[in-house]
Amino acid sequence: MGGMSFAADPHAGIAAVTQAGSTEQLLLTLLLVLPIVGFTLTVVLGRRLSRPWIIAVPTIIVVWAIATYLSVQALIGDAFHGGAIQTTIYEWIPAGAFSVSFDLFFDNLTAVMLLVVTTIGMLVHVYSIGYMAHDPGKWRFFAYLNLFMFSMLLLVLAANFLLVFAAWELVGLSSYLLIGFWYHKRSAALANKKAFLVNRVGDIGFALGIMAIWTTIGTLDFVQVFDLLPAQLAGGHIEQWMMVGICLLLFCGAMGKSAQFPLHVWLPDAMEGPTPVSALIHAATMVNAGVYLVARSSPLFATAPEALILVAAVGIFTAIFAASIAFTQKDIKRVLAYSTLSQLGYMFAALGVGAWTAAIFHLATHGIFKGLLFLGSGSVIHGVHEEQDMDKMGALRRKMPITHWTMLIGSLAIAGIPPLAGFFSKDEVLGEAFKLGFQWVWLIGVVVALMTAFYMFRLMGKTFYGESHVDPHVEPHVHESPPTMTVPLIILAVLSVVAGAYLGLPLGDSTIHHWLAPVFHPALETMGVHAEPYQLFGIDGALILVSVAVATIGMVAAWRMFGFFRIHDRLDTVRALTARVPTLYQGSFHKWYFDELNDLLFVRIGGRVADAFAWFDVHIIDGAVNGVATLTRRAGDEVRQSQTGRVQNYALGIAGGLILIAVILLLVGTR
Amino acid sequence: MIDVSGLPILSLIIFAPLVGAIALAFVPGDNVRLVKQVALATTLVTLVLSLLAAVGFGAAAEYVLPGSEGSSGFRYVETVPWIPFFGILYRVGMDGISLLLVVLTTTLTTISVVYSFGPIKTRVKEYMISFLVLELGMIGVFLALDLFLFYIFWEIVLVPMYLIIGIWGGANRIYATIKFVLYTLVGSLLMLVAILATAFTFQAANGGDWTGAFDLLTLRAAGGFDPTLQLFCFIAFFLAFAIKVPMWPFHTWLPDAHVEAPTAGSVILAGVLLKLGGYGFIRFALPLYPQAAHDLAGIIVVLSLIAIIYGAIVAIVQPDLKKLIAYSSVSHMGFVTLGIFVFQEQALQGAVLQMINHGIITGALFLCVGVIYERTHDRTLARMGGLSKPTPVFAGVFGFFVFASLGLPGLAGFVGEFLVFVGTFAVSPVAAAIAAFVMVFAGVYLLWMFQRIAFGPVSDFLKGLGHHLTDMDRTEVLTLAPLFALTIIFGLYPAAILDLIQQPVTDLLVALGSAPATGLVP
Amino acid sequence: MTIQEWLAVAPFMLVMALGMLVIIVDLIWPDRPSRVTGTALVGLLVAGAVTVIAGPIPGIEGQLPATGQSVLDGVYVRDQLTTFLDLLFIVITILTVLFAPDYLAPRGLPVGEFTATLLFAISGAMLLAGGHDLLLLFIGLELLVLPGYLLAGFAKRDGLSTEGAIKYFLLGSFSSAILLFGLAFVFGFTGSTRIDGIAEQLQAVVAGSATWPVGLLMGLALIITGGAFKIAAVPFHYWTPDAYQGSPTPVTGYLSVAPKIAAFALLIRLLVEALGPMRAEWGVLIGVLAAVTMTVGNLSALGQDNIKRMLGYSSIAHTGYIMVGLAVFAVASDPSVQAAGIQGVLFYSVAYAFMNLGAFACVSALQRRPGVTSQIDTFAGLGRRAPLLGVVMTLFLLSLVGIPPTAGFFGKAVIVISAIEGGGWLMILAVLMMLNAAAAAFYYLRVVVVMYMREAPEGARSVTVGTLTQVGLVIAAIGTIAIGLLPAVTSATLDWTMEAARSLFGA
Amino acid sequence: MSQSLDAYLLLACGLFAIGTFGFLARRNAIAMLMSVEIMLNAVNLAIVAFGMFIPALAGAGQVIALFVMAVAAAEATVGLAIVIAIYRNRRTPLVDEYASMRE
């Protein structure tokens, strides 16, 4: 732990749970009640409102204020002494020994998550006023956004696994609704279904994991689970392999929601939704739920190092895999989507190596700058009249200066250029990985950093610099976006600049470590990780230099290729380069054929299998049923044929029957 | 609060529809308005009576069988000797499970009757009489505590449903209705043999005295039938109930019946009739033949798992809306039987919950299909598309129930399914893991259906309907609103159900010899 | 003869005399058939009243002792069984008398002759009910079937009617000869014509554990064959569909009920009472015959489009069900179980009488207008054309299926429960019976389908049901429902049939 | 031989078999009716034989035989009536042509 030092507070950690005071209870409840009320009112009244956002947006601003107040109280005011508060709303499922309460839980991790979620959520709401201004169905949009905020807040506030699962599904629903917001587009209708279904695949694991937790530990409440676990492990009630199993199952859920390989396929398609949705749900908040889940379950994962290695491997593989696709995509939102995948991979890598704090740190900063980038891209798309293909953009920096500058800041941040936010968090992820003995993670991570810088500046170059490829009809109408859109961009840009420094300094003893130490202390204890002094002029410094260097290399390379600050871009060079490695280019361009593979496996082959089942049902099972009926009738017709209408035949029947009976009786009766 | 303890409230609930049906018989058939009013009034009275029973349920005294220790768990018990020759009683009683199912029945029947005002144009009187008799039968099944009485109600249900599908159904209705009746009869007639055999065994052991031989409470208290008898009788009961549920591979009557039945018929079929099977298992088959139930549980669990997965997979490729939902019922009802036969507290509670919730949600889905059908006279998915635009309210409501059916937390479908999962996992993680795959398959068929109907551009077929394609009218909203509300209420506050069924479930598990499983933490 | 002895024979003698009276009335008022019908109905009610007064009936204080009254040195016995059957026959006759005129009159068939013939036939049935002597049983049987042949061919200008009659007649007399030969063997090898005498003789053989003489076994085989013909058991059933189809519909209704039940009475007297000690020999045989009969009957009915033939096959199936009760008697060793078997036979007979007569009466009502065929299609849209007729027909059909709460359901339940009490392979018979009932539902419900789910053909005329037929239908419907639905009636029927069955065992 | 009951019974059985065979083999309704009469006479022979050889049955046998004759006569009457009726319809006494009712 890079030089971090925190006082081993005996009260720190999960044990220090107190019942929420009435004020906190009210505020926590309001956090959930307000958005759901906003949702309901907007659904009921929205169509009749001249300004459909009039309920939804103020609601979320209030929610943001409450969340910020609570979080600041907890993190800076240290109101709960690093511990947690819990409050019971009511008993949700009282099924005998299986009793699940609607409990809310608030500790420092929750506080950090709340800050990220509500801040970006609030900004996106405001931004949407402008972005959706001309959409006839915008009341639905704001209603869905409120529903999403409710679900996401429930997700971070939930005090037990089942409630998290419930929220997990609800964010999935919101995501489904918002991806399919433009339902008349067939692609949107397909994308939201795909998103929901792929998520459900992961949810199987999550659900089974929850069941496993209940059957092994006997409760689903976070605090109780974490409390009971050590004793039960030590006492042999629970075998270690069970923990590995539980953790892997939970991780399945996380993989689905956070779109980790191979369940990553839904996220790029989810870009069919309106851009604010992509920013809020598919970049800054919902997709982080998987990271949050693993972080929240750190005491469990800490007991299952085998599972953690898999987490790290999946994470870092997704990081490089997604980055490789982001290289060649033409759709501006898809580049960002793959970038999101890649960054989420970083977070999982961090979780996997045991750098819990680093993962959350990156989650927070990534939320800010990726939210910024998406909103910026939305501004661009808006500016060029709903065009998403970067080949039809270029040289927009003069026409959309605010968008340009804010996105440039975002790109620098994600590339990891000091002193922007991404630098601090990414450096911490990579540094921790190296120092905790996962040099392979670090090595791949460094490569990914290089790639990240490259594709981000490719995006910037193709969009804002070089020659304009904008449709000539549209060109004269390209304009900067309204203030409701630019102001959130500016705020996020400012945050991208300062958040990293605020949270990440001083190096080795950063604010965020202080905040999260109580949360992750038990996990670290279990894993036996101990803080080492930070060596700015030793290993830590060297690692910083390496990552900054690779980021710069990537940035400069893109810079040169995509014509920064030049009139003419060098697309010829790019073409020549790609022509030299056609296989790689095509592979990357086609996302390594994963959509095709899925189509083959699940649509074609799966469809055939389902057809076969249906055939079996109709022809074999129902065929057997009808067959019995037909057979019976046929038998009846056959039997009836003996009814010939001729008296002699009938008499023969009687005589035959008589002889048969007589013979039987004589045989039986005289034996 | 009205005190119902002095009234023969259960008999009132059972026979109120009969009174209505008889009254209807004297209403001239061409006075459709009066016919509808009488029918609606009858169902409303029955609904109110059942709600009164529900309100007074907590305060009502539990019946204690003379000569036995402890409560029987049933309230409002009424006992009248019926056929003394065989010791057959008219004995009805109510526990939490039957209370829920009765209220579900009265609610859905009322809704169905209201819904039918529009679509049913021919022979309205006969239709309403059939519905009322159907209601009588269904309520009777849920309340009967005498095996013979139970069987009689069980068979009574058959006739009106036969007529409803056969007279007011679709093109291929006769095939469907005869299949429905014959299939059900095969099972139920064998069950009759088992009932009689059980009673006789009791009588013989009791020195030739028929007293109490058909009485569930007496038989349950006596217990301990010979294993061979248990096995055969259980198999007979199993057949009857498995066909009704319907369990794989006895399910093929269901898609046909659903496709051909009129909307309200489908609602009742899916909402209540399928529950008769699950209820039969819980109320009769398990307490009477616990040994056989244990012996055969493994097979039944496997069949349930097959039903869950298989039903969902087959639903994926159904071109007809009603068929799709019918197969989804096969899958959903698989959870009921799975939950029952793992003999675990949570699973059993989940199974009961699932029965109620499936009744509400699938009933609502069929009503939604009816809304489409009334406007398009078609149910082919391939012809639908983009209904969100011309009929937004409908699309919203339909989507709501689609997600409820999908098991979205917070809505009714989730809790039951999850409890079954949890309970199953505690007994057999492998079974739970297999069943869990339905989470994806259910998503595939439900979302596919929803996408085909609500999303995309408006299909040419629908465009051709022009102004006939109106959004839901007031009656339709009125019928779906209670189900909408119940879906949310039972999703957010399942305790409303769970508290009621805790006692019966515990009793059943004790009778089965499976002590309620407790987590390690109290 | 004492008063009591006169009372004992009074019912069948009254009916016989009534037959003659009807002839006289018909002679006096040849063109007033309603007087004939009225006379017959009044007379039958009187006969019924006399029967009730004579007793013995459980629960009613009659003039005769509950243990029964022997007449003429034991040739005729009026016990609970006799009274029960007599009343059942009288009810059947009343119903037939009610149904017939509406069918016969439009076709120009003489009501007076019909009624007289019918009354003579039924007096034969009543003779059978109480016959306790081989000769008397044979006379009774002939008195029953000879008018039956005439009734079958009553529409003598109708080719089908006469064809059915001659088939029925030829095969019937063939089987009578067979039965008679069997009676002769029994008579010769036991040395007695009295039922109890024979039973005593055979009991002695059983007690001496000697083997049965071959002649006795031959006699048994011949009796079973002859009896099986009369009840229409497979493979002696071939005459049934043809005779049923050909006969005028009210006659078919009568033929499907009265001779069958009377033949069962004959079998009870012969096989159960007289040859009871030999039941080990005939029990299994009857059981197998029962299984084959119900299965073949139902299978044959499945594809049948002529409703009279269909009901004919169905009556064969019902014969199979009733035979289960006989098998129970033969197989069981516990007297109370044996009684339960006979009770099943009797209970089912009552239920069957009401529902089957009712069903045929509906067909007959539909055919009031000459020229209406017996094809099931003629029922199309009946639910609309004649709602009440549709409803009662549905009721009878449901009862024939065995759907509660109807008489038919209880009939099946009582027989099944007796089979279960019998245990062993009778359980298989019970299950087979239930599977058969399920299959049978198909063809009964097909009629309901046609009535309610098919539209009436173009130009179908509305159906008007005659008053007498209406009264008869109501009686039959009430009987069908009451036995199933009204607890008091169900219980009374159960008790009565049980007592009647027990009276065979001298209890 | 002629003094033994069995002989008479065998004769009766033979007659009965002949009657049965006639019933099965002949197609003419009248001939079939005559075959049935032969069967009834066979029975009568057996009954009378029983009466002869078994003292207890002496009286009964003869009475029964008389009754059977009466019944046979009645049967013949009814039968001929029916035969005439159908002959009027069908113009043939051959029963295998009476097959308009069949499956």
Image (cartoon, coloured by chain):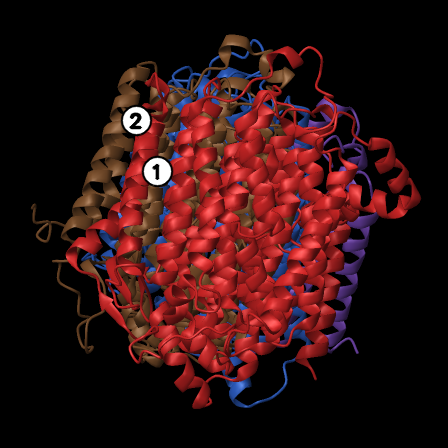
Chain colours: A red, B brown, C blue, D purple
The residues bearing labels 2 and 1 have C-alpha atoms spaced at a distance of 30 Å
Foreground residue among C345 and C147: C345
Q: Is residue A299 above or below residue C384?
A: below
Picture quadrant of residue D94: top right
Say which element carries label 1.
helix
| Residue A400 percent across, percent down from the top left | 57, 24
Say which element carries label 2.
helix
Foreground residue among A609 and C273: A609
Q: Residues within 10 Å of mark 2 (few under 14, many from 20)?
A: some
| Residue B419 percent across, percent down from the top left | 42, 62
Name the residue type under label 1: Leu
| Residue B489 percent across, percent down from the top left | 30, 45
Q: Is residue A221 above or below residue D40?
A: below
Q: Would residue D38 appear left or right of A83 to someone viewing this image?
A: right
Give the residue pinned by disc 2.
B25
Q: Residues within 10 Å of mark 1 (few under 14, many from 20)?
A: many
Please report the residue visible at 55 percent of the width from the left and 29 percent of the height from the top. Answer: A403
Asked if labels 1 and 2 touch by Cβ distance under 8 angstroms, the answer is no
Foreground residue among B232 and A472: A472
Mark 1 chain:
B
Q: Earlier in the sequence, mark 2 or mark 1?
A: 2
Please report the residue visible at 37 percent of the width from the left and 80 percent of the height from the top. Answer: A228
Name the residue type under label 2: Ala
The residue most toward the right is A580
Q: Would residue A390 appear left or right of C232 to someone viewing this image?
A: right
Q: Which mark is residue B483?
A: 1
Whether residue A550 is visible: yes
Q: Is residue A114 above or below residue A140?
A: below
